[in-house]
Amino acid sequence: MSSVPRTIEWRNSAVVLLDQTLLPTQVATIEITTVSVLVDAIQRLAIRGAPALGVAGALGVVLAMDQCIRESWSPTQLDDAIDAIRNARPTAVNLAWAVDKVRPLVPEGRDVVFAAAQQIAAEDEAANHAMGKLGADWWLNKVGDRPLRLLTHCNTGSLATTAWGTALGVIRELASRGRIEVVFADETRPLLQGARLTAWELDQEGIPYKVLPDGAAAMAIMTGEIDGALIGADRIVANGDSANKIGSLGVALACNAAGIPFMVVAPESTVDRSMKTGKEIHIEFRNDEEVCNFAGVRTTPLDATSYNPAFDVTPARYIAAVVTEKRVYEIANGEDLNTGSAA
Ligand code: MRU
């Protein structure tokens, strides 16, 4: 992927994002120098995916500090700008987590905040590779040391992180060991992160894949087309309940009905131990337009409204294992994220 711009980086006093709303037909970047444009980019999913949002949040604080100097903001204006970044999207904990991590450093100066933001990005990259190895070992031990047919939902690759990916990082690692037969990539309605982004990443890597409508996942799972499923997460709480892109829950239920493993892969920065169960997770609901239009064309009656949650929560009891860079939590065997031991 060397010719492809990085998902997010700091260049020439700006946050530079690969605009994920345009992929795969256009590979274009946006240079951002103001907080309002960054917040807009986050909200319209030009940058998305929990770990990438964390990096955007941390670099956003640097951006806010620069804008504060340029435009002679008051301390309150700076605080409000940082809050706007932190609250741009509510479900992925990484955004608030990263802002809260660098914000206390603001009094120490811009360079200290910048270094901390860069460290968050570097740690994410290292975590990606560690999860890839742990997750790949788990699949080969549990399911069999052979090429696997795995289903994934949404996009959890380099576009959603700083590097290699979470669930897609496990798939990359398995592919590098010759242990992927095919990846079933759910298209992921309504914004098609699977069909547009995961398929694009798999294509670049030369990993065999099929794109399927979200509604076809249960059939593929129940008819034995798939050995297991793995997804990322936007927030994993203490008991293992995991929020991820809408449609993940259906995949988990079907895997459980079929008796095949359903795995969640995410860095420790996505684990929110302050929440005990998934009931506490704030689910983002998005606008009617995303559901009532397809590729800019109205597909519903003009006065139709929508039910458009961006995420759902899979209860821990449907998750075989949660993989972070630290370890594999065998949720199905009674472990939880708090102690890592029998609950
Ligand atoms: O709305 P999105 O595209 O930001 O949702 C992203 C997901 O649900 C991902 O699966 C999750 O953030 C994990 S990314 C490694």
Image (cartoon, rainbow, N blue to C red):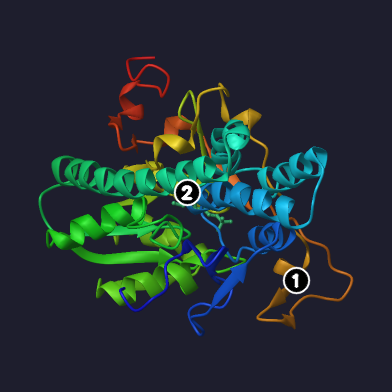
Quadrant of image for the C terminus: top left
Left-right relation of 333 to 93: left
Residue 70 x/y as whole percent? 73, 57
Q: Which residue is mark 1?
A: 292
Image: 155 above or below 231: below
Instruction: Name the kind of residue labelled 2 in the image.
Output: Pro
Q: Residue at x 66, y 60 (%)?
A: 38
Q: Residue furthest right?
A: 303
Quadrant of image for the N terminus: bottom left
Q: Which residue is mark 2?
A: 51
* SS under mark 1: helix
Query: Is residue 108 or residue 207 the one in the foreground?
Result: 108
Image: 148 above or below 93: below
Q: Residue at x 56, y 63 (%)?
A: 13
Residue 76 x/y as whole percent? 81, 38
Instruction: Name the kind of residue labelled 1 in the image.
Output: Cys
Left-right relation of 276 to 306: left
Ligand 1 within 8 A of label 2's CB?
yes
The answer, for residue 56, to whether it is visible in the render is: yes
Query: Is residue 208 or residue 110 the one in the foreground?
Result: 110
- Which image quadrant for residue 182? bottom left
Residue 78 x/y as whole percent? 75, 44
Q: Residue at x 63, y 33 (%)?
A: 107
- Crowding at mark 2 (Cα within 10 Å: few <14, some 14-19, many 20+): many
Q: Distance between the Cα atoms at labels 1 and 2?
A: 29 Å
Looking at the image, is mark 1 or mark 2 nearer the viewer? Answer: 2
- Crowding at mark 1 (Cα within 10 Å: few <14, some 14-19, many 20+): some
Tally of numbered tags:
2
